[in-house]
Image: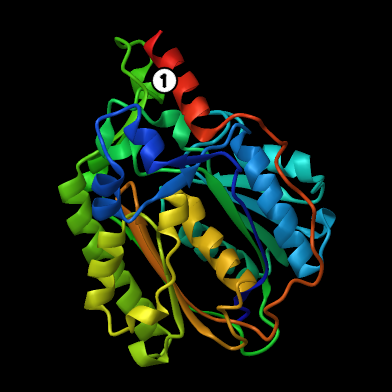
Amino acid sequence: MRRAAITGWGRCTPDPVLTNDDLASVMDTSDEWITTRSGIKERRVSPAENSDMATVAASHALAAAGLEAEDIDYIMVATCTGDRQIPATACRVQDKLGATNAAALDVNAGCTGFIYGLNLANGLIAAGSAERVLLIGSERITPFLDLEERSTAVLFGDGAGAAVIEAARGEEGLRSINVGSDGTIADVLTCQGVGSSYIGEPPVPIRIVMDGTALFRAAVLGMTAAAEKAITDAGWTGDDVDLVFPHQANIRIIDATVRRLDVDDAKVYTNIASYGNTSAASIPLALSEALDAGRVEPGAKLILVGFGAGLTWGAAGIVWGDRVEPITTSDAALPPTDKTGLQIIMERQALRSA
């Protein structure tokens, strides 16, 4: 049976930066408070649409794979912050890329969206329903943040990561994958004020809210079990794993998960300090960054693991191929802006309070 392999990678990180000190200047918090509780020092804020970030990341992934947009059969965008309720953000990405031969759909599994999308892409490849899938994790989550909700306002940032997925040509590719969910704790992380449940009801402020204590426990247990299963199903041990890419939600969650796995701390890739929690974008963004930094070697055994709203979780075991450098490059980028991250956030907060 054919299995999926990642042949191209790319990312998009908006220029405007929002630091902890920036947040401390407008809300009751501090750099020390945020850093010690989350590991985050700064995050990015996008003035552009989610589909614009997704398109930039996708353009870099296509170039890395040496492909044109017309070569893609399927576009999936893993996101919980689509441009609009209708249509799917993937349809807007298809148009912006000019991927005229591609079907398009969104996948919403919260922060686990990229793993869920990888599972679906693998199924399409294995069944022969697609030859090339463009999978994008992209989130513009900062417009949903309320500075009066400190527990979430300091955690999230915007960004996108993308991967081109094709049938494996040799020993490389997906060796295991598992996903799961527990809807009984769906409300521990949710976005209020958006969705058909709120139409016709008294207005509710649009904001992300969470029960941090309940989420922490569920996240650690879910990620640990998923990663252990991915390692076992691939026929590996913890010592065999070369690099782990956990969802970048909270450094404490990552550390607690790693302590439960038989994997050396040095093998865990983190970039949460620079980007915060970018939800479905965090794993592909980190993978792209690690590849460009030379952290992924040919034949490396990788574990991708995440959890998200739903509650959802999942993990994949991947053997990387021989190529760790892009075939070509792209100059795709977001339009320039003169605004800082703090300016953008404060303008939105003013509109929220109007």
Q: Is residue 55 above or below residue 145?
A: below
Q: Nearer the viewer, residue 76 or 339?
A: 339
> Where residue 201 sits in the image (x, y, percent)?
31, 12
Q: Is residue 199 above or below residue 26?
A: above
Q: Give the position of the N terminus as an image quadrant.
A: bottom right
Residue at image point 45% right, 14% down: 351
Say which quarter of the image contains residue 196.
top left
Residue carrying label 1: 349
Q: Is residue 119 left or right of residue 96?
A: left
Q: Is residue 294 left or right of residue 146?
A: right
Q: Nearer the viewer, residue 281 or 72?
A: 281
Q: Nearer the viewer, residue 127 or 168?
A: 168
Q: Judging from the image, what secondary structure is the residue with disc 1 in? A: helix
Q: Give the position of the C terminus as an image quadrant.
A: top left
Mark 1 packing: few (<14 Cα in 10 Å), some, or many (20+)?
Answer: some
Count of labels in the image: 1
Q: Is residue 52 above or below residue 197?
A: below
Residue at image point 61% right, 85% down: 172
Q: Nearer the viewer, residue 210 or 184?
A: 210
Residue at image point 59% right, 38% down: 50
